[in-house]
Structure formats: structure tokens, C-alpha cells
Image (cartoon, rainbow, N blue to C red):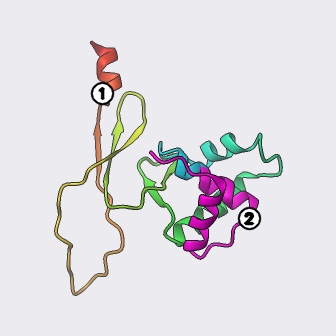
Amino acid sequence: MMNYDKEQTINYLISKNIKPSLQRIAIMQYMLNHLEHPTVDDVYQALAKEIPTLSKTTVYNTMTLLESAGAINSLTIDEKNVRYDSNTERHAHLKCRKCGRVFDMKMPMMTDCESDDFEIDKIEILYYGICKECQQKQE
């Protein structure tokens, strides 16, 4: 895992045509350095101490902007929370039924789907199971 610094994060935002601001830089840097698929609340809780003026609305709006620019993806894994992922490469996810964490998984090779009726812009593959750490706790 790469540890993104402020300058790298600013360059990443600019490459996605996003104007860097204090909040956008902090949120994007958090997303790039924390790959655990956080929710808006997770990001807010992590950054609120260092940015006292940050609001959940700002985090939500920034996440929406980042997603529309292709910098992050949203994941609808359960009906309670939308989670976000800074890994925009094609991959699948596994949600552990015990601890609730979400993990990246290599996606099986698939040919691109083609349709005359649809333009496909997003594919989500979600597995449910028990992660290795929870399996070891069971033993």
C-alpha cells in the first residue's frame, strides 16, 4: 500500500479535474491511505479533530464530487450505509458476516458485457463469507 502525502493527493485531485481545498485534500488523502471502505461517518469521525470546521454534509458532498469525477467508487453493500472505495480498478468485494468488514477481492476474468440496449458503466460483485481473522477466532 502506498502512503499518499499532501502533495501527491493534490496532484491526484488535479488529475481528476477537482479543485483542491483543505477539506477535499484531507478527505481524498484519507481515502487513499485507508482502504477499509469507510462510510461518510467513518471519514467524518477520523478527520473532525484535525479539521474542526468539517461537517458531515461537507464530507458527503465531497464524496459525491469525488465519485462523479471517478476518484472513488460508492458501494451499496447493505441498506444501512453506503461505503466508499478509492480503488477504482475493476475488482470484487467480500463482506465478512462476523465482523462486517469489507475486503477487496480479485475479480474473476470477465469479458466486457455488450448490449445494444444498455450502456454499462458500473459492475458490482459482492461475496459474503467469513474473513480469515474471524475464522481463526472460531477455532
Q: Residue at x 24, y 54 (%)?
A: 107
What residue is shown at x 31% (from left), y 75% (from top)? 120
- Quarter placement of the N terminus: top left
Q: Is residue 33 left or right of residue 110?
A: right
Label 1 element class:
helix
Question: In the rendered structure, which amino acid carries the disc numbered 1?
Answer: Lys
Residue 76, percent from left and from top:
43, 54
Spot occupied by residue 138 in the image (x, y as percentages of width and height) = 30, 15
Q: Position of residue 127 (x, y in %)?
A: 28, 45
Disc number at residue 132? Answer: 1
Q: Residue at x 77, y 52 (%)?
A: 54
Residue furthest to the top:
139
Residue 6 in magenta stretch = yes
User: Pointer 2: what residue?
Assistant: 21
The magenta span reads 1-29
Instruction: Give the mark count.
Output: 2
Relative to 22, is 95 above or below?
Answer: above
The residue at the point 47 percent across, 42 percent down is 36
Q: Seen in the image, is 34 located left or right of residue 25?
A: left
Give me the C-alpha separation between circle 1 and circle 2.
Answer: 39 Å
- Image quadrant assignment for residue 135: top left
Mark 2 residue element:
loop
Count residues near mark 2 (Cα–Cα under 10 Å), then give few for <14, some for 14-19, many for 20+: few
Q: Residue 77 vs residue 63: left or right? A: left
